[in-house]
Amino acid sequence: RAKITDPNVVGFESDSEESSGESDNNVVGKTEELIETRPIEVESTIIENSDHGEIILSETKSEIIEIKDDPKIINIEKKPAVYVDVIRNEEIQIARMKLPILAEEQQIMETINENSIIIIAGETGSGKTTQVPQFLYEAGYALKKQIGVTEPRRVAAISMSKRVAEEMNLSTKEVSYLIRFEGNVTDDTKIKFMTDGVLLKEMQSDFLLMKYSVIILDEAHERSVYTDILIGFLSRIVPLRHKKGDPLKLIIMSATLRLTDFTDNKRLFKITPPVIKVDARQFPVTVHFNKRTNENYLKEAYSKTVKIHTKLPEGGILIFVTGQQEVNYLVRKLRRAFPLKHKDKMLEKEKEVKEEETKEEVDHFDENNKKKSIRKKKKVKIVPEINLDDYSLPNDTETISDDEEGLTSDEESDNIDDITVFQNAQPLWTLPLFSMLPSHKQQKVFQSPPNGCRLCIVSTNVAETSLTIPNVKYVVDCGKSKIKLYDKVTGLTSHVVHWTSKASADQRAGRAGRTGPGHCYRLYSSAVFNDVFQQFGTPEIQQKPVDDLYLQMKCMNIDKIVNFPFPTAPDLLQLKTAEQRLEVLGALKKGQVTLLGRAISKFPVLPRYGKMLALSHQQDLLPYTICLVAALSVQEVLLETPILATSPEDQKATRQKWSALRRQWAGTGNALLLGDNSVLLKAVGAAEYAHSQGKLQEFCDKNGLRHKAVREIRKLRLQLTSEIKKNLPEVDIFVDPRMEPPTDLQAKLLRQILLSGMGDQIAKKVSVEEVTEDEDKAKFKYAYKANNMEEPVFLHQNSVLKQKLPEFVIYQEIYETNKIYMRGVTAIEPDWLPIYVPGLCNLSEPLVEPPPYYNSKTGKVHCTMQGTLGSQAWPLPPMDMA
Ligand code: CDP
Ligand code: MG
């Protein structure tokens, strides 16, 4: 049949009208057609789930096999006859035996042995994450292949791998983790904890996940985008692996929330997978509602905690607020109110030897660049086990622009210095917890507090389900969480603090009943809970742009994404805008992935940044683009408001100083036109220099850089560099961590590269009338008109282009606070548009004669339009030398 033109297409069953209307485009035809078909030369797997529910698998050359998606076939796997011994410490063994899931081990293992897909539902703390991988290990699942466990959060992947290694007396070589920037996976890894995004990336090169014998999707109730997609894929991969005679087990683990999205979803699983419910050993928790709902929940949380601590019997306190900055604020306030006694601070006797991470990283960077590194003696720092360092706030300099995430002015003026210090009260061991916190600081919450102190943890919703903190008796719940809202059409983002769901509130309350009867203080009224709270939160997939997923799925040969078996499907509008943006980017053409699109998808960053990387290798700008892409992929690198400042005047002065400094960093000429991105480049380069001098923290504090962001950028630069080396063996890149600022020409090329990635985010200067109270004094000022946006958008005071106000700019993001602002702005020239964003322009003829481009390393001018990535080639927009 002529229809079978592309063997690499995975189609999904369609039950929507829309898609069946387009079935002519469906590359793989209907079942009968396939079966009639004479030998087809296919190299890779065709998977089609036809209208009739069969899964058709055709593998390597001229073979077409049909299997019925029938429970009997799936249920015939035998229990492995092996048992792998694990020698556990007595203490661990005793603690394990108390976990409710231990009582269910036999039932769980029997169900797993008899079924391909099972769901384990149990309250947080029942032992799912730590124990199920161990059951599987003992039953021999790690003998030939790996046991893979996915977590939606990096924190959980790291901490759970460490915990399981410890419980099993195995090294981190065997029980390992892999997250986007780092990992300790080895060839000997048996149990691998990873973020869900990492597993999805792995599927791109190994669709059937051949190196795993079992995949555990943990925290499925969190409904993270990647976990959702993985469930969809695995619902099809499991039968395929079965057919191959090399079965893969799928275990979906979840809190007892909204299971029906998985169980009553015929599109996902034809046969409802068995559900094993694990009863948590949960003590009763008394829930106390506030009579009235006070807007200022931070103040309320503080006074409630003071009351609990001064009046109620011992037991840890866990406070839920919405964001990192609120956590830091409250921690600071509580520490001031209930200070540690001198002897508590000094209580450490044991010393722990820690190598200074920084030195190691420098070596790694050098090694990565195959440069001879001058071996520096490893500095050894002695860190006392509990010292003030541990007790200090994570990043005292860390703050987020007050536009967006800051405290309201009310709270800011609520001066911490004015707090009553409870001199004679019991000291309170107050710790912060949020996902951006460095992991060694996160681990602190699991340790017991110094003698005589009460434990108090101030957390974001990280502590809601993924981490279980021991000995919490009191929960203080503000009832809110922060989400980033995203407009599906315009891309406008805003951070909104809103009420959580009933399900989340109950999860939070449950944290108080882990070790004994507990109390949950809800800082809102029962009326609000009953009338305003939704039953469940919205799955993440419906809340953010899906461009990266869309491209990734296209590259995995999913022809019709609307037909993919999502547990909850994204909005059609989301899919449509993603497709449009990818078309503009050149990653898709008429719905098909282009070669450029494939190249883009290889990079673990958003498609727009992937394109910038893919293009710049031909322009010899890689080190700069890598640096920019890394910096753009990390949130909040440059701070706007200092936290350490002592007074409002001081704050203002620091802000002004930073602002002036950034203008200076931006440079002149093309560098200045590169705008905020020029500042980013300079900041990263300067931070690297400070790092090599061992003064990174100091440098960041002084110049308003977020220390943790800088470290993350460094990791991402390393990762992107090695990714490029892997994909482009012929490219000899040397990424100097300390980069010279780009030359004027390079800065211009970078503006063009940025345009090629952000061509859908262009804004043109317009003049607007500003409404003032006094109508006679109507003011005119400049604003911008951005794609798809009706309202004017503005350059923020902090943008280095604020004075210059270029005619055309591209922006990284638009966000709304009191006005709509652009972030990450670079000036562009309008005549570049047809070259770099042809998808946006109505050209009757394609541009035939592109201008040449210049390779600054070789000094040569090239006229070719082809670029390569490995063996692939794609048309390349030329760089303008004029
Ligand atoms: O996954 P689930 O929420 O069902 O429970 P888990 O994470 O496996 O935790 C089981 C128990 O191990 C809890 O009681 C935790 O307190 C304990 N645990 C711990 O003490 N330290 C860790 N790093 C992780 C878990
Ligand atoms: Mg868990």
Image (spheres, grey):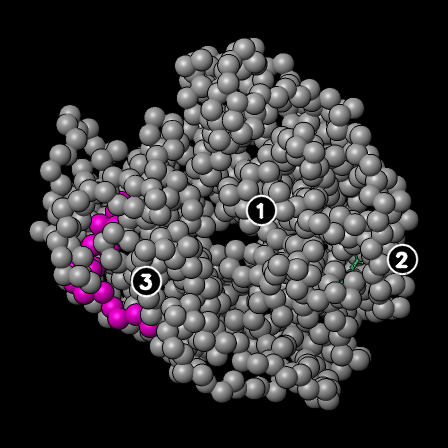
Question: Which amino acid type is shown beneath numbered disc 1?
Answer: Leu
Residue annotated with mark 1:
199
Q: Which residues are magenta?
A: 738-756
Q: Is residue 685 magenta?
A: no
Question: Which amino acid type is shown beneath numbered disc 2?
Answer: Lys
Residue 479, x across and y down, in percent: 66, 49
Position of residue 236 relative to residue 637, above or below, is above
Residue annotated with mark 3:
733
- Residue 93's quadrant in the figure? bottom right
Eye-nearest disc, 1 or 2: 1
Please, what secondary structure does the residue beneath circle 1 have? helix
| Residue in view at x 59 percent, y 15 percent | 51
Residue 524 shows in the view: no
Residue 714, x across and y down, in percent: 43, 66
Q: Ligand 1 lies in which image quarter?
A: bottom right
Residue 624 lies left or right of residue 264; in this view the side is left
Q: Earlier in the sequence, mark 1 or mark 2?
A: 2
